[in-house]
Image (cartoon, rainbow, N blue to C red):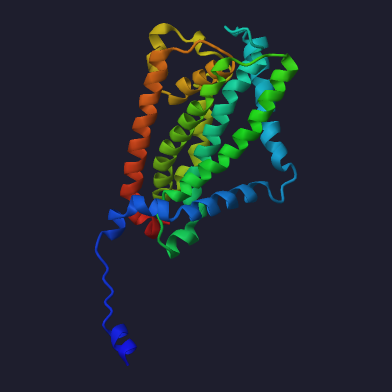
């Protein structure tokens, strides 16, 4: 009887805005969901595929081969460092491939998890974040290929290699910031997903992947650094090949990445309440 009275005296109190108040704490509470989604995306990417992991090797190698022929043999562009031209291209291809894959995956991540979003509550930031982690696996596989190329060319990397994790984090933040903004737009305007491949393809040609930033005139370098991947790719080559890095351009790119992160999070959080309705 006493137990019955105790049950009847229980009150369920739902405070308005409580999810907003505890949102960032909920990111930690739902960390296991982040692990599950990341592992699921990794398994789905490589399960029941003909090439599987080999695709993460073949694609950057083919792109490096094409860029080396076009920019080195046909356009006659020179590599300012002592490294082979193919190594310079691959060192730039690594961060760009990570960025482009992460941006593409995160942009479509909410649409791909529509059933999950409409049924349960959790911080939606977890979904695009887990998709960026999936792209990091491709990056690590491709990095093994870079090591193999260094052995083939008998090229010893620069001691700056110890700073490489910093630039990997910058790529992550860059893809995550822009990805948050684009995925929120993609939920509201579904035809926007057709524009994403064009943006990525256009970005490839205005980013120093197949060529060195040294070919850009000094008066254009700061304007060129508005593309945040410019400073990141220059940083990768500085770490791996010992190339010169322009500090002003690099710092400018870092500022752009920070702004994109803040703007992306703010816009994502603003639109997050309407995801379940629009999706």
At which x and y percent is residue 144? 67, 29
Q: Residue furthest left?
A: 16
Residue 9 position (above or below residue 189): below
Residue at 33% x, 53% y is 23
**Horizontal relation, residue 197 to residue 67: left or right:** left
**Horizontal relation, residue 204 to residue 156: left or right:** left
Q: Residue furthest bottom?
A: 1
Q: 2 and 83: which one is in front?
A: 2
Residue at 40% x, 61% y is 121
Residue 92 position (above or below residue 74): below
**Horizontal relation, residue 252 to residue 62: left or right:** left
Image quarter where the N terminus lies is: bottom left
Q: 149 and 52: which one is in front?
A: 149
Q: Does residue 205 appear anywhere in the picture?
A: no
Residue at 41% x, 57% y is 122
Image quarter where the C terminus lies is: bottom left
Where residue 117 sits, quadrant-wise, is: bottom left
Residue at 61% x, 47% y is 42
Q: How many marks?
A: 0
Q: 205 and 24: which one is in front?
A: 24
Residue 278 position (above or below residue 140): below
At which x and y percent is residue 137? 60, 39
At which x and y percent is residue 107? 47, 43
Q: Does residue 113 appear anywhere in the picture?
A: yes
At which x and y percent is residue 50? 75, 45
């Amino acid at each position: 009887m006493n137990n019955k009275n105790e049950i009847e005296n229980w009150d369920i109190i739902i405070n308005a805005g409580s999810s907003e108040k505890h949102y960032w704490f909920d990111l930690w509470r739902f960390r296991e969901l982040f692990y599950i989604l990341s592992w699921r995306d990794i398994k789905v990417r490589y399960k029941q595929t003909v090439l599987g992991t080999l695709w993460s090797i073949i694609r950057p190698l083919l792109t490096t081969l094409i860029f080396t022929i076009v920019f080195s043999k046909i356009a006659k562009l020179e590599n300012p460092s002592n490294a082979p031209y193919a190594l310079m291209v691959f060192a730039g291809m690594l961060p760009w491939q990570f960025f482009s894959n992460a941006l593409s995956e995160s942009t479509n991540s909410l649409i791909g998890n529509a059933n999950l979003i409409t049924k349960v509550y959790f911080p939606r930031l977890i979904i695009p974040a887990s998709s960026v982690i999936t792209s990091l696996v491709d990056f690590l596989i491709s990095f093994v290929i870079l090591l193999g190329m260094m052995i083939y060319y008998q090229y010893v990397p620069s001691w700056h290699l110890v700073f490489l994790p910093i630039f990997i984090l910058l790529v992550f933040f860059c893809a995550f910031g822009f990805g948050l903004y684009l995925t929120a737009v993609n939920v509201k305007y579904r035809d926007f997903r057709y524009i994403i491949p064009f943006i990525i393809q256009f970005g490839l040609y205005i980013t120093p992947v197949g060529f060195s930033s040294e070919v850009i005139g000094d008066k254009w370098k700061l304007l060129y650094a508005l593309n945040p991947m410019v400073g990141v790719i220059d940083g990768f080559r500085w770490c791996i090949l010992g190339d010169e890095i322009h500090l002003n351009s690099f710092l400018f790119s870092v500022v752009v990445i920070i702004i994109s992160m803040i703007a992306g999070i703010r816009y994502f959080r603003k639109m997050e309440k309407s995801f379940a309705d629009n999706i």
